[in-house]
Structures are given as structure tokens and as C-alpha cells.
Amino acid sequence: MAATLVALVGAGLAVEALPGAGLARGPKIRAVRPKADAFVSQASRTQNFGHARLLKVDSSPTLRTYVTFAVDLSDNDIQQVSLLLYSRTKSRAGYRIRLIDERFRERRITFANAPGLSGDSVVSGPLRAKAWKAVDVTMLASGEDDYVGFALTSDSGKGVEFASRETGLRGPRLIVQRRDDTTGSTSTSTGEQEIR
């Protein structure tokens, strides 16, 4: 059921229209839109790509993608956190996801001033072209602030491209699943959808 909801949220469908979507007890799933996303390029160290409709990851030349979400992950009832991206290209190697240590401004971030990366990482696994992929980042998710930011890197010289938030419905999402023992309801607020 959770995988189905993730797919529907990623596709921008109205989950509240599902039969019984607001009636059953169970996990509460929230799809959070990013506050900022951009890629940076080692070949153009001072150029900003924050307005681009694509996010890019590559190892030669080095291209990294940065994405940040305004979300509170401090609750003890969090079951799973997944980064959901729409891949425009296929890849056997996929990419790595790392935490970043500070916030960034979408229209100012460059390779030269990009935030540092954590040592821990999660690997996405293979990607299909023109398809959504959810990657479990629960082990990376930090609950010490009201935001969480990630960097996407690659060890492969075959680049990967994703839809950025500028594309609208195919932009990145952070899927946060919490335990919930109360009767569910569906609510929507700016930048996120909540499904119970």
C-alpha cells in the first residue's frame, strides 16, 4: 500500500480520491516538495544552474545535485523517509545520496560555494528512463533542525538527469511515513500532501 501511495503522490494524482483513502487506520504519508534544488558543475565552478529544469549527476566532469526540504524529522514516530526523483535517463550505476551540512540558496549555489558533504551515503541502485525511483534515506535523515538537505553524487562517468522542481509535478519529493493509530483524514497544505 505504501509503495502505491508513493507512486501516486509522485505522479501528482489526487490520493484523497482513492476509495477509503481517508478512512483506514495505518501509516500517515506526507510528500514534501523541495524548497530549493540545483546542480553544480566542476567545469563551470562559478556558474549557477538553479533555474534549470534538469538536475544532473556525473563524475566526469563532476556534476552534483543539491536539494533541500523544509520538514521536521524530529518525531520518534517516523517509520521511513524516502527521496523520490523522476529520472529522465537510465543508469546501471545510479547515484549516491549524502547529507549536506548547511543550507544553500537556489539562485546562488555554484560548485565553488556548494555545501560540504557527509561521509555516509545511500546508493540508489539502477534507474529506468522516464520513471520514478524512491530511495530509502531513513538512515541519513536528521531530526535536529526544521530542514534536511541532500547532495547527489556519482562514481560513474555516464551522467544521470532528473526533473527539477521547475518542472512542477515531476519535481523531487521527500516521502515521510509516520505511524498513526488514529482514524485518518486527508489534508493538503502549501508544498505538501498528507495521506492517512
Image (cartoon, rainbow, N blue to C red):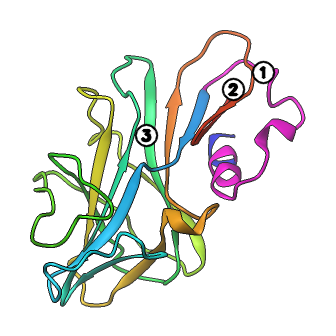
Quarter of image, res 81: top left
Real-space Cα separation, disc 3 to disc 2, in angstroms: 16 Å
* Of marks 2 and 1, the one in the foreground: 2
Quadrant location, the N terminus? top right
According to the picture, the residue beneath numbered tag 1 turns out to be 24
Identity of the residue furthest to the right in this view: 19
Contact between labelled residues 1 and 2, with CB atoms less than 8 Å apart? yes
**Label placed on residue 81:** 3
Looking at the picture, how far across and down is residue 164, in whole percent? 48, 68
Mark positioned earlier in the residue sequence (2 or 1): 1
Tell me what residue is drawn at x 55 percent, y 81 percent.
129
* Mark 1 neighbour density, 10 Å: few (under 14) some (14–19) many (20 or more): some
Distance between mark 2 and mark 1 Cα atoms: 7 Å
Residue 8 included in the magenta stretch of the image: yes
State the extent of the magenta-drawn residues as a range.
Answer: 5-27
Kindly identify the amino acid type of the residue bearing the numbered disc 2: Arg
Relative image position of residue 172 (x, y in whole percent):
49, 58
Cα distance, mark 1 to mark 3? 21 Å
Disc 2 target residue: 196
Callout 1 secondary element? loop
Is 24 left, or right, of 58 in this rendering?
right
Q: Is residue 120 left or right of residue 130?
A: left
